[in-house]
Amino acid sequence: VLKHDYDIIPSYSEGVIDVFVADSTYAKLFKIREGTPLLSVHRTVYEGQGRAIQVNYEIYRGDCHSFAFTVGKGEEKAR
């Protein structure tokens, strides 16, 4: 949609994944015990000129998620 409708091409992203423990609010929200590990993911996607085009802030349970990702787009995928 970005490329087709707006001629915007994502170029790269920057992000941070942190681990923290659930307080009472997150424990209730995720139906887990206080002190359970959670992951916070903050990511910003940029187009080629450095303009931010997407910002994400997400929180995941630490006991049931894994992440696989590619940052940037090259001629070949690195494995």
Image (cartoon, rainbow, N blue to C red):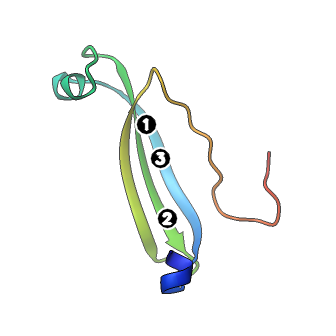
Residue 23 picture location, percent across and down: 21, 24
User: Quick check: marks 2 and 3 in contact, CB under 8 Å?
Assistant: no
Mark 2 or mark 3, earlier in chain: 3
Q: Could you tell whether 14 is left or right of 79 in the image? A: left
Q: Which residue sits furthest right?
A: 76
Front-most of residues 68 and 49 = 68
Residue position marked by numbered label 3 in the rendering: 16
Residue 78 picture location, percent across and down: 79, 51
Residue 14 picture location, percent across and down: 52, 58
* Helix, strand or loop for disc 3: strand
Nearer mark to the viewer, of 2 and 3: 2
* Helix, strand or loop for disc 1: strand
Q: State the separation of the CA atoms marked 3 and 1.
A: 6 Å
Residue in the image at 56% along x and 79% along y: 3
Residue in the image at 24% along x and 16% along y: 34
Residue 69 picture location, percent across and down: 62, 47
Residue position marked by numbered label 1 in the rendering: 18
Nearer mark to the viewer, of 2 and 1: 2
Q: Could you tell me the amino acid type at mark 1?
A: Asp
User: Quick check: marks 3 and 1 in contact, CB under 8 Å?
Assistant: yes
Front-most of residues 4 and 50 = 4
Say which mark, if any, is on residue 45.
Answer: 2
Q: Name above or below for residue 60 compared with residue 77.
A: above
Q: State the separation of the CA atoms marked 2 and 1.
A: 18 Å
Q: State the separation of the CA atoms marked 2 and 3.
A: 12 Å
Residue in the image at 49% along x and 83% along y: 5
* Helix, strand or loop for disc 2: strand
Q: Could you tell whether 79 is left or right of 11 in the image? A: right
